[in-house]
């Protein structure tokens, strides 16, 4: 008999040797409590590896980042205590503040638009006229499996002075509209944002199609018998069933928007000026170009708190209400 | 659930204790010796030695140096570790601080490397090899760093320049002829008139790589026509001064005016250096203000249609001037073979290295053994370099004034070209960056 029973050996059904006496004398409630605490101990054992992993690779680095954020440190020399100076700097530095604002505007492109587009596509692909559309699904999901750096480079070509977009505009007689999109103060930000929409939509579609598959076929049949149209079907049957999937999609895409780095860094590095600067690019520049690791950490902490807060709000809205 | 939360808190607390009992960040590593102990030797080992060299120099000068050096010393191998300019600058200090530090490292800008004791003080080698007789005082002073570890322009030497670059005005002779201009501009007024002629002909007057921060080259070049090398270099070296000088004002205003008049390439804010060089090479612009490092690409694209002169001066006959940088190498404080690494530096400034350096578009320290370049634009560059050297008009680069200055100049000049900020605002923002990096000055 192992010292710690495994999950399959529930204490009540297979009592250990010493248990008989307690069973005779003990009350029922005590018995359950001791059983539960034992089961809990087993549960902790199972939890230990992931919790340990999480503690070492997530919690510890986060706390270490928090710690460094109170120092003035160039990453190599010896840091000096800075108190809250790095945090007050975030409040006062205009570039730092505007980068956080940009991250929130990116939510429209990285989160709201992909979810809306994906819902529209899901509406087309589900319901009574349901087919599987394997090719379209693969094409839509493709941006997700491409490395973000490759996506960024490809789009930089598309937006380039002699790029595909300008060629198309030229071919249809709109030469007047051509420009270097990523060097334009007005257009660089939406140009980067649209790439985020392109990447995010496929992911959301996959979430929603998976969610739509668990909708019982009978509901659609019943709706059809009642004379519901395609749109009505989607609104009254598919959409309510997708509540949780929308929540998951919103969470994933919100993190992608607020913590966006690779696409922005590859496409514009935050330029022109600081018109596409986002917090993560700034963190990178602060830590590795400016040698201000303490301030980079402070911004990282603020950003992580913003992400936590945003996710808490999303969970609140989309959470189980049954 | 609450038990789980409790244990999570316990884990977090443990992690926190682990963190907070450690002392200040960065105090863990063993310090390297930045000053050589005792007298240095110029006698290199006869045993096999492998040196590692880290660089971002991409014009081909470094491989040539390695080839010549290892030929002269067959027992020494040099492993070349090359990365892009941006990646290199972001990672070199971490490499130098690591246990696998390269022996030799290119210095684009010192940043915190001297302050953090990552580089070997070369002063003893200067005397041992007599480098102070091969290079002029300003050439060495540019790489000297004062005791605060940040201010350049005097103090201890931490890197030796092996090849020099010169920035000037590339021009397209065919376009010049086409617009009826007899000679490249000698004064700023002539320059303005030439830009206007190009505009009338529907050709870009001045190609600007504002995405790479090179729009600031034009600000500086105009400023140099009014401000002395001491004034601007003191600011660049972080010694003293302000960006708010009469010359800088004229430079910023000129750039804003040219942008507004449509003299620059239409997509300047989105054009990087590669794009600008390629456009100029295709004959799309009359002028390109750029360094000698691109002479290879430009000579190849335009052949004898390409010319190079120092930037036009304020009045005819004023002293010629230009920005100049050096391809400078430093020895890591953690190098196990400082003697051999220093010998490499000495080879770099020797007569034997001259041809390889010039072939890559840099001006060698010792020109006694150099064959005349066959590329017409390179011949122009050698001529311009000699003129500027003789006139004492050598300036550093604005972008070297702080670790973040290149980013700041890139952003602010893009905004200026787009007409989103005023010249005064640009000067204010650039000076704010400088003040952050040099709090004592």
Image (tube, helix red, strand yellow):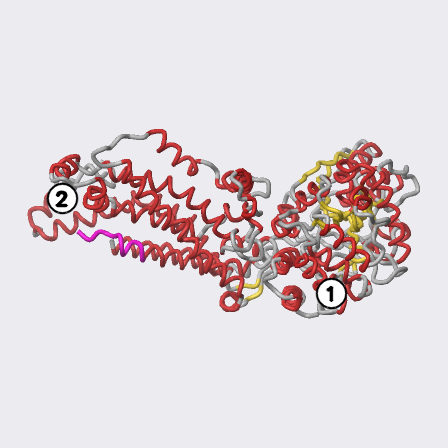
Q: What is the crowding at mark 2: few (fewer than 14 residues within 10 Å), some, or many (at least 20)?
A: some
Task: Indicate the secondary structure of the residue bearing disc 1.
Answer: helix
Residue B267 higher or lower than B317, as above or below: above
Span highlighted in magenta in the image: A313-322
**Residue B310 in the image: x percent, y percent?**
83, 52
Q: Which mark is residue A19?
A: 2
Residue named by callout 1: B248
Q: Are marks 2 and 1 in contact (CB under 8 Å)?
A: no
Given this view, does label 2 or label 1 mark the residue nearer the observer?
1
The chain ID associated with circle 2 is A
**Residue B49 in the image: x percent, y percent?**
75, 36
Q: Nearer the viewer, residue B163 or B307?
A: B307
From this viewpoint, is residue B37 visible?
no
Q: Nearer the viewer, residue A296 or B211?
A: B211
From this viewpoint, is residue B382 visible?
yes
Residue at the image point whose x is 69% and y is 61% from the top: B257
The chain ID associated with circle 1 is B
Quadrant of image for the C terminus of chain B: bottom right
Task: Indicate the secondary structure of the residue bearing disc 2.
Answer: helix
**Residue B329 in the image: x percent, y percent?**
76, 47
Q: What is the crowding at mark 1: few (fewer than 14 residues within 10 Å), some, or many (at least 20)?
A: many
Q: Nearer the viewer, residue B176 or A135?
A: B176
Q: Is residue A318 magenta?
A: yes
Q: What secondary structure is the stretch in magenta mostly built from?
A: helix
Please give left or right for residue A197 compared with residue A231 in the image: right
Separation (CA) of disc 2 from disc 1? 89 Å
Please give left or right for residue B289 compared with residue A48 in the image: right
**Residue B220 in the image: x percent, y percent?**
74, 59
């Amino acid at each position: 008999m192992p010292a710690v029973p495994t999950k399959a050996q529930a204490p009540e059904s297979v009592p250990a040797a010493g248990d008989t006496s307690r069973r005779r004398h003990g009350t029922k409630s005590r018995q359950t409590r001791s059983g539960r605490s034992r089961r809990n101990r087993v549960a902790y054992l199972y939890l230990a590896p992931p919790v340990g992993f999480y503690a070492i690779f997530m919690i510890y680095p986060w706390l270490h980042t928090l710690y460094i954020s109170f120092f003035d440190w160039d990453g190599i020399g010896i840091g000096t205590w800075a108190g809250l100076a790095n945090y007050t700097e975030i409040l006062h530095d205009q570039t730092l503040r505007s980068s956080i604002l940009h991250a929130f505007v990116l939510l429209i492109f990285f989160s709201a638009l992909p979810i809306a587009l994906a819902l529209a596509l899901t509406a087309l692909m589900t319901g009574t006229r349901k087919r599987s559309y394997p090719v379209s699904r693969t094409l839509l999901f493709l941006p997700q499996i491409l490395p973000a750096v490759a996506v960024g480079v490809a789009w930089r070509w598309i937006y380039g002075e002699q790029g595909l977009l300008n060629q198309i505009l030229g071919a249809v007689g709109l030469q007047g509209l051509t420009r270097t999109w990523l060097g334009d103060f007005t257009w660089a930000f939406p140009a980067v944002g649209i790439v985020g929409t392109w990447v995010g939509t496929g992911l959301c579609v996959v979430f929603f199609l998976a969610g739509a598959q668990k909708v019982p076929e009978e509901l659609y049949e019943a709706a059809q018998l009642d004379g519901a149209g395609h749109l009505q079907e989607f609104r009254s049957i598919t959409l309510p069933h997708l509540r949780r999937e929308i929540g998951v999609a919103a969470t994933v895409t919100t993190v992608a928007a607020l913590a966006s780095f690779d696409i922005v860094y590859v496409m514009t590095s935050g330029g022109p000026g600081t018109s596409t600067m986002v917090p993560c690019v700034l963190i990178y520049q602060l830590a590795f170009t400016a040698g201000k690791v303490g301030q980079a950490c402070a911004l990282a902490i603020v950003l992580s708190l913003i992400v936590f807060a945003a996710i808490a709000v999303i969970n609140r809205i989309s959470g189980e209400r049954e | 659930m609450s038990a789980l939360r409790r244990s999570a808190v316990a884990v977090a607390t443990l992690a926190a204790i682990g963190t907070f009992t450690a002392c200040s960040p960065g105090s863990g590593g063993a310090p390297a010796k930045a000053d050589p102990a005792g007298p240095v030797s110029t006698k290199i080992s006869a045993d096999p030695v492998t040196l590692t060299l880290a660089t971002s120099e991409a014009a081909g000068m470094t491989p040539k140096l390695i080839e010549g050096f290892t030929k002269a010393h067959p027992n020494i191998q040099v492993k070349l570790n090359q990365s892009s300019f941006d990646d290199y600058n972001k990672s070199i200090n971490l490499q130098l601080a690591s246990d696998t530090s390269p022996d030799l490292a290119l210095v684009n800008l010192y940043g915190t490397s001297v302050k953090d004791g990552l580089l070997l003080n070369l002063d003893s080698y200067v005397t041992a090899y007599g480098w102070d007789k091969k290079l002029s005082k300003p050439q060495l002073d540019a790489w000297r760093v004062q005791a605060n570890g940040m201010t350049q322009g005097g103090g201890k030497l931490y890197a030796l320049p092996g090849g020099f670059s010169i920035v000037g005005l590339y021009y397209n002779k065919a376009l010049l002829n086409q617009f009826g201009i007899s000679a490249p501009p000698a004064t700023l007024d002539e320059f303005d008139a030439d830009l206007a002629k190009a505009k009338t002909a529907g050709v870009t007057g001045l190609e600007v790589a504002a995405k790479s921060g090179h729009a600031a080259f034009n600000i500086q070049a105009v400023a140099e026509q009014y401000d002395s090398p001491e004034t601007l270099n003191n600011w660049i070296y972080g010694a003293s001064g302000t960006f708010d000088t009469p010359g800088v004002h004229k430079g910023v205003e000129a750039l804003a005016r040219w942008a507004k008049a449509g003299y620059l390439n239409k997509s300047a804010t989105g054009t990087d250096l590669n794009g600008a060089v390629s456009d100029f090479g295709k004959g799309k612009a009359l002028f390109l203000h750029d360094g000698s490092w691109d002479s290879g690409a430009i000579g190849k694209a335009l052949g004898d249609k390409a010319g190079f002169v120092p930037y036009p001066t304020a009045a005819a006959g004023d002293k010629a001037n230009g920005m100049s940088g050096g391809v400078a190498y430093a020895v890591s404080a953690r190098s196990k073979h400082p003697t051999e690494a220093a010998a490499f530096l000495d080879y770099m400034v020797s007569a034997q290295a001259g041809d390889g350096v010039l072939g890559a578009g840099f001006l060698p320290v010792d020109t006694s053994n150099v064959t005349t370049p066959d590329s017409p634009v390179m011949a122009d560059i050698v001529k311009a370099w000699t003129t500027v050297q003789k006139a004492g008009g050598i300036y550093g680069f604005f972008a070297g004034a702080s670790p973040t200055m290149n980013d700041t100049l890139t952003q602010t000049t893009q905004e200026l070209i787009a007409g989103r900020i005023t010249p005064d605002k640009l000067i204010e923002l650039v000076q704010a960056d400088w003040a952050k990096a040099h709090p004592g000055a």
